[in-house]
Amino acid sequence: MDERRKIEEPVSAEFERFNKDFEASLRSETTRLQSAIDVILNSTGKHVRPLLVLLTAKVCGQVTDNTINSAVLLELLHTATLIHDDVIDETKQRRGVPSLNAIFDNRISVLVGDYVLSTALIRSIQTGDLRIVGIISNLGRDLSEGEIKQLETAEESILDENCYLQVIKKKTATLLSACTEIGAISSGASAEVIALCREFGEYLGYCFQIKDDIFDYFKEANIGKPTGNDIREGKVTLPLLYALRQGREEEAARYLDMILRKDFGAENVDSLIEFAKANGGIEYAEARMKEYHDKAVDVLLRLPESEARTSLIQLADYIMTRSK
């Protein structure tokens, strides 16, 4: 049994229900829309977010119909944000295959993203729980604000670790914390347990995004985007932020000037990557990632022991050690 299947085992039947419901939720009688939906379904990732919803609900007691519905709506919301992000970033590949906007165009991609987002909102209302509707509403705002904050940070070359972490909180941590919080709500957990689950998801979100950012510094990272892509877009992430602080003053000043001038040709991007590596940037980012991982696990250990809790700990480990 591979690592991922082992993690899924406590909710394998429920995960199968999610997969069927997710696919059914996206069906359309409009030919071009269905063609786009087929592309989405053929390129979806590992469904980490719905798995979080299901496992958290299981830890808190039981997976209900509302849990399945919540897992679907959160994956729909996440999918919509990815479609819109690819348009904003002019990304032509996702997970090694052509993105929706590369196959169709930006007009179709934006409209498909809106369709998927609207479907998610309908599903949130169908939960009949105003707490879930409120979380989803705030989440949509946070994700948009995080994306704008990241664009602003890149355009103005704001090189500050606290600002970097603020972007992560809005773009990634809020989504994962919504998954774990809603998972707990859907199972009927107490307010205290719901708060713990929300905290676990937030820490896990920081861990997840730092790992993604580390991938950008390695050619062997098989994540469907070129090495140094973040740097080319002006996104200075944790390894490079640390190197700019710790590197020799003269060398750091030269690379800082390169960033401020946005001189991101291929040779300069390679140099910035090597500068980050040579000055301990990767090791620092990995240490920060482990801090968040350990905080997440510590929160989990305050919940009752179960197979689902063990799977959540394994999922936290997987997020930190994954190769793509």
Image (spheres, rainbow, N blue to C red):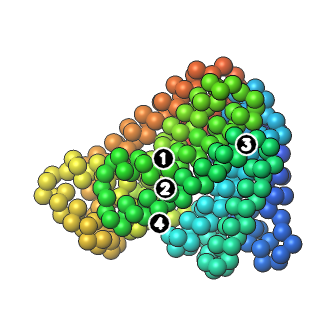
SS class of the residue under badge 2? Answer: helix
CA gap, disc 3 and disc 2: 24 Å
Mark 2 and mark 4 lie on one chain; the one further toward the N terminus is 2
Percent across and percent down for residue 238 are 36, 50
Task: Report the disc number at residue 226.
Answer: 4
Left or right: residue 98 versus residue 222 is right
* Nearest to viewer (mark 1 / mark 3): 3
Query: Which residue bears the numbered disc 1?
Result: 169
Q: Residue at x 43, y 40 (%)?
A: 289
Q: Amino acid at mark 2?
A: Gly
Mark 1 and mark 2 lie on one chain; the one further toward the N terminus is 2
Give the position of the N terminus as an image quadrant. top right
Percent across and percent down for residue 292 are 46, 36
How many C-alpha atoms fall within 10 Å of the one at disc 2: few (<14), some, or many (≥20)? many
Tell me, yes or no, whether the two marked residues, 1 and 2, touch with CB atoms within 8 Å: yes
CA gap, disc 3 and disc 4: 42 Å
